[in-house]
Image (spheres, rainbow, N blue to C red):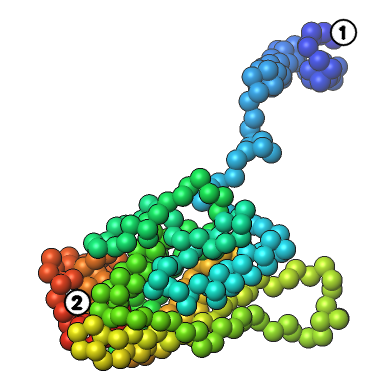
């Protein structure tokens, strides 16, 4: 003799098999009840469209950029190299070029939405959001420079700013400060070279399926010249920089100023800190008259920004 349990599926009816081996009716009914509840829960999730995992069409996390193909990566890095090489000589006239128009392929000025500076050209913050543009810089681009002689507190050993807005604002500061102190400003590119790691071993012996290296940087050596508006003395500065491309997006995510000769006067850093706020990680608030005194000191010493 055995007990019969009515269940909604074959899987539930199989739960009664232990009864054939002497299991009690209560054990059979208890097990069937548990499975019945599980079955109903699964049916409800299916009816309501409830998912325990993210569906394939879930939008990607905007904070985590999607990896692009090797072909697209090479295209982006090549485009950035072209833009920098073609537009840096006109920096003091046009400002920093940060993107290109995808329709025309022409370089484009910095986008709007950045921190304003006193006496800055409104065109530096021109926003043409309707244009279809591609930026050559990462939104989290990092600019850094280590002065040859450590600056006094509150400045850190290595000065750095991060983020596209601060990067653009610092370029506006440099451009307008030098234009206020000097006339006939020019930029000449002395050296532009692409640096990539050398392949190890015989390339022909390496498997064709091996992923291409995404380590690439651009070295730029330039000379900036100008004539001091007050004294009429000629000024000249040699600047070496390295632009490093992100292996994930192909955009410039690190801009390292390797050297500036002659090195800027400390008054320049005081002026920059006064204009941009505590951008160098300093704890002390900037003095209200910092910018004015720094510009005066820069004019007297002929130091660049």
10 to the left or right of 261 = right
> As displayed, is residue 214 above or below residue 16?
below
At x 75%, y 11%, the residue is: 25
Q: Residue 138 placed where, x, y %?
A: 51, 61
Mark 2 touching mark 1, by CB under 8 A? no
Number of the label disc, if any, that sits on residue 26: none
- For mark 1, does the 10 Å Cα neighbourhood hold few (<14), some (14 to 19), or many (20 or more) residues? few
Q: Residue 32: which quarter of the image? A: top right
Left or right, 222 with respect to 42, comes to left
Q: Position of residue 23 (x, y in %)?
A: 78, 18
Helix, strand or loop under label 1: loop
Residue 153 place in picture, x, y as percent = 21, 78
Q: Is residue 5 visible?
A: yes
Q: Secondary structure at mark 2?
A: helix
Examine the image and state in which quarter residue 206 appears. bottom right
Residue position for label 1 = 1
Residue 295 disc label: 2
Residue depicted at 24% across the width and 63% down the height = 119
Q: What residue is at 62 percent from the left and 53 percent from the top?
A: 103
Is residue 266 visible from the viewing direction of this image?
no
Q: CA distance from mark 2 to mark 1?
A: 103 Å
Q: Residue at x 74, y 84 (%)?
A: 200
Return the residue nearer the eye: 115 or 230: 230
Left/right placement of residue 230 relative to residue 49 reads left
């Amino acid at each position: 003799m055995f007990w019969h349990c009515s269940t909604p599926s074959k899987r539930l009816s199989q739960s009664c098999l232990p009864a054939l081996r002497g299991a009690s009716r209560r054990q059979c009914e208890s097990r069937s009840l548990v499975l019945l509840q599980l079955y109903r829960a699964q049916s409800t999730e299916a009816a309501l469209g409830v998912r325990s995992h993210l569906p394939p069409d879930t939008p990607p996390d905007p904070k985590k950029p999607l990896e692009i193909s090797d072909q697209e990566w090479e295209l982006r890095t090549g485009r950035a190299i072209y833009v920098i090489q073609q537009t840096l000589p006109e920096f003091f006239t046009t400002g920093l070029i940060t993107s290109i128009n995808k329709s025309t392929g022409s370089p484009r000025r910095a986008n709007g939405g950045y921190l304003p500076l006193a006496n800055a050209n409104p065109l530096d913050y021109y926003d043409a959001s309707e244009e279809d543009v591609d930026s050559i810089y990462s939104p989290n681009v990092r600019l850094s420079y280590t002065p040859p002689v450590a600056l006094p507190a509150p400045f850190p050993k290595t000065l750095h700013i991060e983020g596209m807005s601060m990067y653009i604002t610092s370029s506006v500061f440099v451009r307008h400060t030098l234009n206020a102190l000097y006339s006939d400003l020019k930029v000449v590119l002395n050296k532009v070279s692409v640096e990539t790691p050398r392949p190890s071993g015989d390339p022909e012996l390496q498997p064709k399926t091996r992923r291409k290296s995404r380590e690439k940087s651009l070295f730029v050596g330039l000379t900036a010249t100008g004539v001091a508006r007050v004294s009429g003395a000629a000024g000249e500065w040699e600047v070496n920089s390295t632009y490093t491309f992100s292996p994930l997006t192909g955009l410039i995510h690190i801009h390292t100023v390797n050297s500036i000769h002659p090195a800027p006067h400390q008054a320049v850093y005081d002026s920059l800190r006064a204009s941009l706020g505590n951008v160098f990680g300093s704890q002390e608030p900037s003095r209200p008259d910092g910018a004015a005194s720094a510009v005066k000191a820069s004019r007297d010493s002929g130091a660049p920004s």
